Image (cartoon, rainbow, N blue to C red):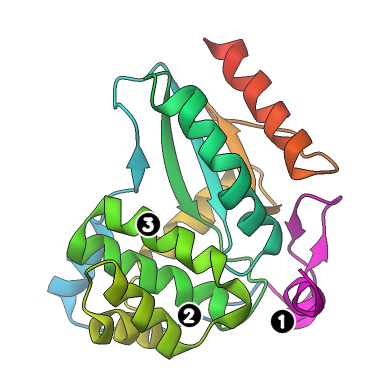
């Protein structure tokens, strides 16, 4: 992560490492940095009905929820290294329904909220496949976040960059993010990435690879 690692771990007042495989909410970070959301009642109702982004069959015997902060470097590593293994081993064969969940700790007061707002705008306007493609590119460019970047990456996946930028700036999808964050807390999560297999939280580990092995074992225990 180079010089950006420290920035993301201590931004917004003290987010700290959780072992070597997670970011932990720290003093001063548990704030609403995403704006109030915009639009009237009709837009708010539409936003609140936005479904959870998923991969895999709804009939899969096991559900895996992954709660992420788009500014957490450990979430980036999990997304880029562990999620492809999860998909090939369990999602594609039909054993797991994968749910993306947002959990802005926040690691960064601005981008922990702006990035997922942008991603949800992509989801609503061009669909879940584009959402997941966009999420990957966000994590790949985590150290370069800017409003221009969020808009340009959205255009690359077929979304309206201006609309996505507006959502990021105005917190359009704030209700969805807050709902996910509340769910994470209710289930006992205090850091990211937080993985739940059929509602049971997977124990963190010293590395993302070890963490994935814990996730893998938890899934197999349910099959």
Comparing 43 with 142, the one in front is 142
The residue at 44%/68% (across/down) is 116
Secondary structure at numbered mark 1: helix
The residue at 70%/56% (across/down) is 74
Q: Does the magenta stretch include residue 88?
A: no
Whole-Å distance between the Cαs marked 1 and 2?
A: 13 Å
Magenta range is 1-29
Q: Where is residue 44 in the image (x, y as percent from the top left)?
A: 23, 71
Q: Position of residue 162 (x, y in %)?
A: 25, 87
Q: In the image, is 43 to the left or to the right of 121?
A: left
Q: Mark 3 points at which residue?
A: 133
The residue at 55%/79% (across/down) is 111
Whole-Å distance between the Cαs marked 2 and 3?
A: 23 Å
Q: Where is residue 117 in the image (x, y as percent from the top left)?
A: 39, 72
N-term-proximal mark, 3 vs 1: 1
Q: In the image, is 197 to the left or to the right of 213?
A: left
Number of the label disc, if any, that sits on residue 61: none
Q: Position of residue 92 (x, y in %)?
A: 38, 26
Q: Name the residue under label 2.
A: 34
Binning the other alpha carbons within 10 Å of mark 2 as few (below 14), some (14 to 19) or many (20 upward) gives many
N-term-proximal mark, 1 vs 2: 1
């Amino acid at each position: 992560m180079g010089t950006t690692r420290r920035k993301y771990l201590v931004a917004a007042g003290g987010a700290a490492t959780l072992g070597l495989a997670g970011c932990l909410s720290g003093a001063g970070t548990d704030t609403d940095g995403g704006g109030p959301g915009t639009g009237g009642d009709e837009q708010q109702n539409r936003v609140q009905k936005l479904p959870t982004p998923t991969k895999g069959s709804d009939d899969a015997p096991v559900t895996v929820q992954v709660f992420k902060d788009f500014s957490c470097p450990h979430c980036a590593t999990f997304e880029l290294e562990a999620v492809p293994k999860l998909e090939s081993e369990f999602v594609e064969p039909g054993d797991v329904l994968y749910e993306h969940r947002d959990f802005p700790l926040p690691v960064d007061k601005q981008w922990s909220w702006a990035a997922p707002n942008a991603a949800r705008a992509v989801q609503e306007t061009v669909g879940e496949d584009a959402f997941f493609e966009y999420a990957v590119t966000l994590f790949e460019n985590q150290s370069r976040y800017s409003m221009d970047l969020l808009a340009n990456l959205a255009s690359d996946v077929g979304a309206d960059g201006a609309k996505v930028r507006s959502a990021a700036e105005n917190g359009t999808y704030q209700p969805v993010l807050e709902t996910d964050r509340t769910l994470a807390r209710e289930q006992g999560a205090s850091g990211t990435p937080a993985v739940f297999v059929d509602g049971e939280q997977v124990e963190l580990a010293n590395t993302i690879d070890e963490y994935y092995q814990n996730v893998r074992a938890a899934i197999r225990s349910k099959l």
